[in-house]
Amino acid sequence: MTLLVFHVDLDQFLAAVEVLRHPELRGRPVVVGGDGDPTKRGVVSTSSYEAREFGVRSGMPLRTALKRCPDAVFLPVDAPTYLEASGHVMDALRSFGFVVQVMGWDEAFIAVEHDEPEGLAREIQQRVLERTELWCSIGIGDNKLQAKIASEAAKPAGVFTLRSGDWVAWMGWRPTDAVWGIGSKTAAKLAAHGIGTVIELATADEQQLASWFGPSTGPWLARLARGEDHSDVSAEPWVPRGVSREHTFQRDLTTREEIQRELRRIALDTAEDVRKDGRDVVRVVVKVRVVPFITKTRGVALGAPTADPEGIAAGALAALDRFPPIERPVRLLGLRAEFVRDEVPHGERPAGGQLEMGG
């Protein structure tokens, strides 16, 4: 038997669930995000493939999506419905008897021992489809990193294998941020040091990387570029490392007093989530998005672990003080309260996580 990892990624998940509820939308461009009103501020959570043909993408402002695809159907996010649909999908995956690691509503890793993995992947696809009427794409690799990247190549509704022997041929000349775990900011810093492709990073001197990015992170980046990932597929429930809230304002905040007042309110709301979790916070990170759509973050470590709402709010205001003077109107504020301060990013983060260095 060959030990492999599958990454199962549901295709256009939120939009697909909405089409199941509204069959008349099949074949039409569908955009899910915010409260479903594209004239308000908010971002796209998911778009159907029909909408993507017009350039509509996740994370895009709803107003931009409306301009690109004025005939799209815009729908509000309905988290309870998506959670229920996700549960049925994960039950279908578990029915095969393998270890399943749920990574969110729409994706999971599976540890597989099988001599015909692509045939098994097709069988998994079919069972998910029969039980939920949802299509998924499946990537196959020797580890989670390879499987995650392979599932992107498999879309839509396909199966793709990317193993160690094929890694360089498939990934070598792609930009460094094509690797799961490396974000655009880290890629830009690598490029500034003359490293622009995956193969260049894979063969870079690790001591030099350590001098640029730190003794743990630098060599870790090289391992990612070589397709190496030693993290296990675990059925243990994922424990979040923090809680976060953010708010998009329909009217811009234009004064320091407004920004501080709204950030304090968000901090106190986040503190309630912290209380429900039952763990202390060691660090807070503030997100500020200014007009037109420029986003920056700043964080501070708290003096001592705490779950006290006033302590979290004070940390948020201290993080706000680390920003340069905010001269543009603010359209969004966010706060993340972190339970664990990880010094070394690693491949066990939720799928889609990227290493982003700097604010």
Image: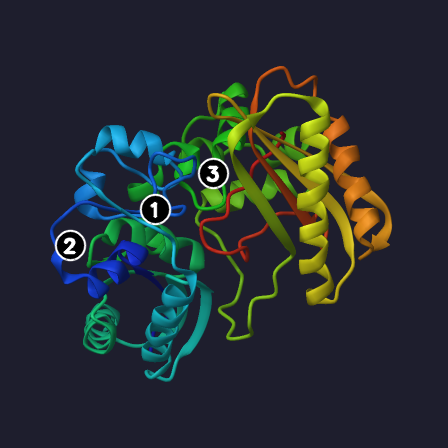
Q: How many marks?
A: 3
| Mark 2 vs mark 1: in front | 1
Q: CA distance from mark 1 to mark 3?
A: 44 Å
Classify 10 Å Cα crowding around label 1: few (below 14), some (14-19), many (20 and above). Answer: some
Residue placed under numbered mark 1 in the picture: 36
Residue type highlighted by circle 2: Leu
Q: Which image quadrant is residue 51 in?
A: top left
Please tell me whether mark 1 sits on a helix, a strand or a loop.
Answer: loop
Q: Is residue 265 left or right of residue 345?
A: right
Image coordinates of residue 10 in percent, x first then y, are: 30, 60
Please tell me whether mark 2 sits on a helix, a strand or a loop.
Answer: helix
| Mark 3 vs mark 2: in front | 2
Q: Is residue 88 above or below residue 148?
A: below
Name the disc covering residue 88, or none.
none
Q: Which image quadrant is residue 265 in?
A: top right
Q: Is residue 28 above or below residue 24?
A: above
Residue placed under numbered mark 2 in the picture: 25
Q: Nearer the viewer, residue 66 or 1?
A: 66
Q: Residue furthest front?
A: 251
Structure colour scheme: rainbow
Q: Residue furthest right?
A: 303
Q: Nearer the viewer, residue 217 or 2?
A: 217
| Mark 1 vs mark 3: in front | 1
> Looking at the image, is mark 3 or mark 2 earlier in the sequence?
2
Q: Is residue 180 left or right of residue 215?
A: left
Whether residue 324 is visible, yes or no, is yes
Classify 10 Å Cα crowding around label 2: few (below 14), some (14-19), many (20 and above). Answer: some
Residue placed under numbered mark 3 in the picture: 202
Residue type highlighted by circle 3: Ala
